[in-house]
Image: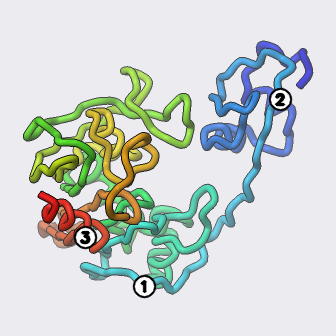
């Protein structure tokens, strides 16, 4: 990089240096950790000193239209308006950076072609998400009416989403409410973090201890908001990261049993049916990957 770049914002310099990319695309690449200055991931507003080495990785742009894939879905409920599924750990909800196939969205499109275009071409019917390593209940919309109604319920905090989690350590408080803003981690752009007021979006999680073990605790969590990685970040902020969470539980001892993801499961979901206005309530038992771990903890006393 020439010294004349000194003092320029990274994103503005890249717009000039890589004219084939739009400013929005450059912002996304920086946010996703694909741009490094002097070997370090940084922010779009980073001021250049001049003379640094800037490395940029440009992953292939995903196709604009989602291809349906015949993927087996664990369907809990289905009617002409909504679809409730129990997502397994390891499945990505919709295509994103580095993931183009094998998504829940592609499976839903193959199962219910009428969802095409409901909520977006690459996110058919999807109104909320679960992380790749998290399992459990999701509701999807099959019609535009259902999509807007469910999005409105989520925005008004009228959808109940309860999770079961096994966390590291013995959580002393029997219950509590975590109200702490969450935003992009300024040091690790692919992770989230608790941020100061004004630098993150409000995030609220309620939790209650269900069972304690020697080095672990079984916790029930209820979301009041739905931020990316919310439960994982909030529990880690208490010093009790979710078991199996490599991103927010670094330095924790290896688990005695592989949970094949994170020990977090969306176990209960309640919403109002967008057409009938009926209260719909669903539950999904712990998957074997977490049930085995819980059984091991109980047997170990």
Q: Earlier in the sequence, mark 3 or mark 2?
A: 2
From the top left corner, tell me how far across and down residue 42 is, in percent. 64, 29
Horizontally, is 43 left or right of 285 in the view?
Answer: right
Residue located beneath label 2 in the image: 53
Horizontally, is 68 left or right of 291 in the view?
Answer: right
**Dot in front, 1 or 3:** 3
Residue at 21% x, 57% y: name it: 164
Contact flag, marks 2 and 1 (Cβ < 8 Å)? no
Residue at 40% x, 65% y: name it: 260
Quadrant housing residue 266: bottom left
Residue located beneath label 3 in the image: 292
- Local packing at callout 2 (Cα closer than 10 Å; few below 14, some 14-19, many 20+) is few
Residue located beneath label 1 in the image: 72
- Residue sitting nearer the eye, 236 or 152: 236
- Label 2: element kind: loop
Horizontally, is 129 left or right of 286 in the view?
Answer: right
- Label 1: element kind: loop
Q: Earlier in the sequence, mark 2 or mark 1?
A: 2
Q: Quadrant of the N terminus?
A: top right
């Amino acid at each position: 990089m020439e010294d004349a770049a000194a003092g320029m914002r990274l994103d503005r310099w890249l717009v000039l240096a890589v004219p084939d990319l739009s400013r929005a695309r450059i912002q996304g690449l920086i946010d996703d950790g694909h741009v490094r200055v002097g070997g370090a991931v940084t922010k779009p507003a980073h001021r250049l000193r001049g003379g640094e080495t800037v490395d940029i990785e440009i992953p292939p742009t995903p196709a604009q239209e989602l291809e349906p894939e015949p993927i087996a879905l664990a369907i809990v409920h289905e009617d002409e308006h909504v679809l409730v599924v129990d997502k397994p750990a390891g499945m990505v909800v919709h295509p994103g950076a580095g993931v183009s196939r094998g998504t829940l969205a592609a499976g839903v499109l193959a199962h219910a072609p009428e969802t095409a275009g409901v909520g977006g071409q690459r996110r058919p019917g999807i109104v909320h998400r679960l992380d790749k390593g998290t399992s459990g209940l999701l509701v999807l919309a099959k019609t535009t009416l259902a999509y807007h109604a469910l999005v409105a319920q989520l925005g008004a905090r009228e959808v109940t989403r309860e999770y079961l989690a096994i966390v590291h350590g013995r959580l002393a408080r029997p219950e509590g409410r975590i109200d702490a803003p969450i935003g992009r981690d300024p040091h690790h752009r692919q992770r989230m973090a608790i941020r100061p007021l004004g630098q993150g979006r409000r995030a609220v999680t309620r939790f209650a201890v269900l069972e304690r073990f020697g080095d672990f605790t079984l916790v029930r969590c209820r979301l009041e908001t739905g931020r990316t990685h919310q439960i994982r970040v909030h529990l880690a902020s208490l010093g009790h990261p979710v078991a199996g969470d490599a991103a927010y539980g670094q330095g924790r001892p290896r688990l005695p049993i592989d949970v094949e993801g994170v020990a977090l499961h969306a176990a209960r979901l309640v919403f109002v049916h967008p057409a009938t206005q009926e209260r719909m309530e669903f539950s999904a038992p712990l998957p074997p990957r977490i049930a085995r771990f819980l059984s091991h903890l109980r047997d170990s006393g």
